[in-house]
Amino acid sequence: MYRKFISYYRRHLKLFILDMIAALLIAGLDLIFPSVTRRFVDDYIPNRNMQMMITVALMMLGLYIVRILLEVIVNYWGHIMGTRIEHDMRADLFRKIETLNFSFFDENKTGVIMSRLIGDLRDIAEMSHHVPEDIFISILMLCGSLTILFTYDYRLFLLCLFFVVVLLVYSLNRRKAMLEGFRKVRVEHAEINAQVESSIGGIRLCQSFTNEDYEYQKFSQNNYRYRESWRTAYKAMTVFATGTGFIINVFNISVLLFGGYLLYNNDINLGVLFSSILYVNYTIQPVRRLINSIQQIQTGQAGIERFYEIMKMEPEIKNPENPIYLTNPQGNIEFRNVSFKYNNTDNYVLKDFNLTIKKGQKIGLVGETGVGKTTISQLIPRFYDVIEGEILIDGVNIKNYDLYSLRQAIGHVQQDVYIFYGTIKENILYGRPNATMEEVIEAAKKARIHDFIMSLEKGYDTITGERGVKLSGGQKQRIAIARVFLKNPPILILDEATSSLDNITERLIQEALEELAEGRTTIIIAHRLSTLQNVDEIIVLNDQGIAERGTHEELLKNNGYYAKLYRATTI
């Protein structure tokens, strides 16, 4: 886990080295001041050497001006390095999330995933900058201070060493409690993000049902748990901070008392005592830095664990070692003894299912909810993998195809169309991002949406709103059809593409879909059976598999389930 994290420093090695060199020089300059103070107390002041006092003071002023420049490097470029590491980690995490299967998104809330992408990585960025720098400076100043102190008086050195060890042991002992506290904070932070994302995303439904109080109660529960998680974390931090603060205060009193005792017995002169006390404070300062670093490490480690948890995931559905590229698909599809069930369920959606669809053929899938119509549409592009059997396109098992080229050959139009926030043009371009404006307009015309777009004040540059809230259902549906026209796939899947639309809009969309399906292998899932009258074959599904199959006229003559369903929907 940490090896993966450290690898991000290699990408910004120059900045890291610059930051560490600046930190080294700052530590060195800080160690000079107590020695100069000793010379003032033991030499320049007793001998009234004003010229040396002024000269040395001006030299120190020059060095502290240099120190300011070094602090600018540490504070600015160090933070820039941390931000760049955060950027790289977020990019890698987003890319990883994009490769994960539908099952991952079935099990994880959007708000939780967002929290891992945003909040967790911000804590890691702060840790990646401050911790290496603080540890480096602290070790240098601690070792430097103790070494110089040893040359002044070994007894003060031993006293300081004892308290440093006590502080470090206490800090490490309290580390686990803080880590557990911050882990809980990260979890609850993700949960409240998920709650807010869900509530805001469904605000129109909430207000239409006047369920504001209900949503507030749900939010209040998550908000309370989030607050309590911080209480646990702060309790651990308080015990940690107050304990270390008390030890440091006892440290100061002990040094002052013991140093006064040595001076009283003439075992040490005033200049040595004075500079020794300064070095003792310079010993406390890096210890404080180390203690703060431990706090940041606990916060950052909780984020690293959650980052690595996703990064180590391997998608169940991935490219074969030697993939076949589906460069010129014909569109022949075959389900051969296919069985499938979703994760965490015992019941098979499909069992020993067989179906052959020939190139350019249009078939309809009909059946009650839960018999596997949508599942069939999701198995073809490998959104899920079959448990048994195989699915073949052009005689090749789809598991042997390059995943990208397989999905590139398939176009989806669904009832629940997703419209991204952005312009209408950007949403149509999603079908083929490198398409020209002329191609976008042509796709919109084929989808019967161009005239509507041109009636808008900003035309294709009109903002759609969150999830297309400024568009009607039919308009969103036609934009989705325009996307598929632009993609121009040889295999087309229409999943309830004309449901819940008025008759005029349905007729427009039906015309567009018929043009879209021309010359393509097409699978149409529909509850409105009137949309299936012109398909080559209708497959009627039940929980046992295929119950009936044939043309619209043939199935009506059979007077089976399809005929009853058709009569029921046309009354």
Image (cartoon, grey):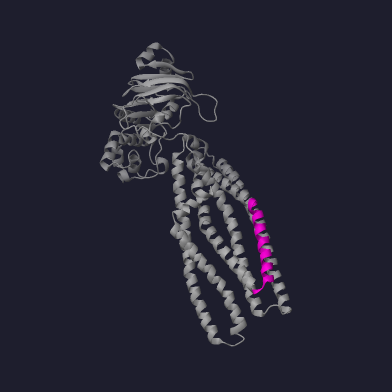
Residue nearest the viewer, comparing 274 with 524: 274
From which residue to which does the magenta span run?
A: 152-177
| Quarter the C terminus occupies | top left
Instruction: Answer whether residue 526 is visible to the viewer in this image.
Output: no
Name the one closer to the observer, 514 or 550: 550
Residue 64 visible to an observer of this rendering: yes
Q: Report the magenta stretch's main SS.
A: helix
x and y percentages locating residue 137 in the rendered image:
55, 64
The answer to which of 429 and 142 lies nearer the viewer is 142
533 with respect to 112 (left or right): left
Left/right placement of residue 197 relative to residue 266 reads left
Point out residue 364 in the picture as x, y percentages from the top left corner.
38, 22
Q: Residue 141 at what x, y percent from top left? A: 58, 66
The residue lying at 63 percent from left, 66 percent from top is 284
| Magenta highlight on residue 336 | no
Instruction: Residue at the far top: name it.
Output: 558
Is 389 left or right of 161, judged from the image as shown? Answer: left
Which of the 4 quarters of the picture holds residue 253? bottom right
Q: Is residue 119 left or right of residue 554?
A: right
Q: Which residue lies most toward the left here? A: 438
Quadrant of residue 10 within the rendered picture: bottom left
Question: With respect to residue 193, does 332 lie above or below?
Answer: above
Number of numbered discs on residues:
0
How far from the left and from the top, in percent, is residue 110?
49, 41
Is residue 167 a member of the stretch shown in magenta? yes
